[in-house]
Amino acid sequence: MSLNKEVQLDEVMGIILERLDAGGTVTFSPNGTSMLPMLRDGEDSVVLKSAKGKKLHLFDVALYRRDNGQYVLHRVIDFERNGDYVMCGDNQFARERGIRDNQILAVMSGFFRKGRSYTTKSMLYRLYTNFWYYSRPLRHSYTYGRNKASSWLGARRRNANRDKNNADD
């Protein structure tokens, strides 16, 4: 019998915050693709610890609550002049500005993939975060070019199919 049950974060946030406030950690499997390739939907688990009273650092991954109530797990990629955070998922390019300290609920201290644990203090993790951050402009250009090429090829295929269908008439 499995004790794992999929629940919405809203349903258990009170318990999570209580556990974090007591100095404990919380482990859960995030869903979505915004933190690919580091965190895979339904496969990996993150370990969170309290961020209460602490300032986040560059490249920290934080669980925060947007003003609209949505919970998000993204990385700190910059700071505003007023001290607010600029956040972004590893698989995204749009920056989310103006995330305040009072929105930060927890910070990731590690994660599990295929039963193996990784901490945010490990050399491998730090190499990944630096590579992923500093390759961002190249990845953005590559993605833009790939999308343009795909749309161009798709248009050529549609035109070729349309011409073929018109020739058959």
Image: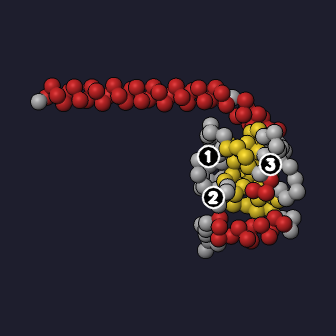
Residue topped by disc 3: 119
Name the residue rendered at 77%, 51% in the picture.
100
* Secondary structure at numbered mark 2: loop
* Secondary structure at numbered mark 1: loop
Residue 73 to residue 12: above or below? above
Q: Which of marks 1 and 3 is nearer the N terminus?
A: 1
Name the residue rendered at 65%, 71% in the picture.
11
Answer with the quarter of the image where residue 22 lies: bottom right
Q: Distance between the residues labelled 2 and 3?
A: 31 Å
Please, what is the three-letter code of the amino acid marked with disc 2? Answer: Asn
Q: Earlier in the sequence, mark 1 or mark 2?
A: 1
Q: Earlier in the sequence, mark 2 or mark 3?
A: 2
Residue topped by disc 2: 68
The picture places residue 97, in percent across and down from the top left corner, at: 70, 43
Q: Mark 2 against mark 3, which lies toward the viewer? A: 2
Residue topped by disc 1: 34
Callout 2 crowding tier (Cα within 10 Å): few <14, some 14–19, many ≥20: few
Callout 3 crowding tier (Cα within 10 Å): few <14, some 14–19, many ≥20: some
The picture places residue 82, in percent across and down from the top left corner, at: 82, 43
Residues tagged 1 and 3 counted as in contact (Cβ below 8 A): no
The picture places residue 160, in percent across and down from the top left corner, at: 27, 25
